[in-house]
Image: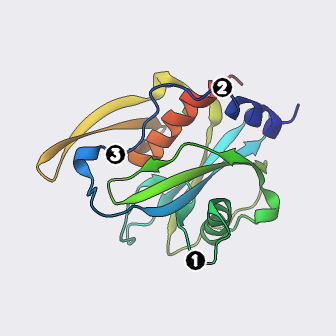
Amino acid sequence: MTLAERLAQAMARIPAQDLLTGDGVELQDESAPPTAAAVLVPVTDRAEPGVVLTQRTESLRNHAGQIAFPGGRADPGDVDLVATALREAEEEIGLSPRAVTVVGLADRYRTVTGFEVTPVLGVIPADLILTPAEAEVAALFEVPLSFLLDPAHHHRVSAPWRGRTRHFYEILWNDRRIWGATAAMIVNLSRRLQWTA
């Protein structure tokens, strides 16, 4: 069975309970409709699958310097959210859509900045040469899928935010801190996939 088939089989299970839906209702402006967005979760097809993540540049208006999946807001010309994720991944990291085997859509997540993000799970060949867009991506790196999906690495923390306490997850990998919406989407994938390498 291929990696894409294994992931698709895991995604087809009955959804896990306790999926995270957003950064917190109390932190969001519920009067404004969310902006549709999608990210690609690029899983490398190797004996020990990994996930490619980006570190955003410090100059970006939203989520500067944070760890993220390649992705962004849906454009009117996008056929669907899969097209959004693939277009954004090509723009941000030079990943050709033809190189991605799309597995399926994961659970949507609402960010405190007003985006409703749909993760698109996809498998890519190992050791592709990817080219980060200088204006958006400061660095690319890969983390083992089994590490990301292990609940032992999902740490619930809190911090003050606009006069309130914000609760979120963080995942520490070497010198990288994956937190906020990206970590929450990883937690959801872990709960849904119940993955074992």
Question: Which residue is depicted at the point 76% across and 64% down?
Answer: 97
Query: Which quadrant does the N terminus fall into?
Result: top right
Residue type of the residue flagged with mark 2: Trp
Q: Which mark is residue 34?
A: none
- Marks 1/3: CA distance? 26 Å
On residue 195, the disc is 2
Q: Image height check: is 64 above or below 104? A: below
Report x, y in % for residue 68.
50, 53
Residue picked out by circle 3: 23
The answer to whether any part of residue 109 appears in the image is yes
> Element type at marker 2?
loop
- Mark 3 and mark 2 lie on one chain; the one further toward the N terminus is 3
Q: Name which of mark 2 and mark 1 comes first in the sequence.
A: 1
> Compared to 126, does 56 lie above or below?
below
For this orientation, the residue located farthest to the right is 1
> Which residue bears the numbered disc 1?
76
Find residue 190 and report its horizontal and vertical position in percent: 56, 30
The span from disc 3 to disc 2 (Cα, nearest Å) is 24 Å
In this rendered view, identify the residue nearer to me: 179 or 135: 179
* Label 1 vs 3, first from the N-terminus: 3
Asked if the residues shown at circle 1 and circle 3 are in contact, with their CB atoms under 8 angstroms apart, the answer is no
Foreground mark, 1 or 3, reads 1
Q: In screen coordinates, is 119 left or right of 122?
A: left
Q: Which structural element holds mark 1?
A: loop
- Towards the viewer: 33 or 75: 33
SS class, disc 3: loop
Q: Do the residues under discs 2 and 1 have CB atoms within 8 angstroms?
A: no
- Kind of residue sitting beneath label 1: Pro
Q: Position of residue 98 (x, y in %)?
A: 82, 63
> Horizontal placement of 88 versus 43: left or right?
left
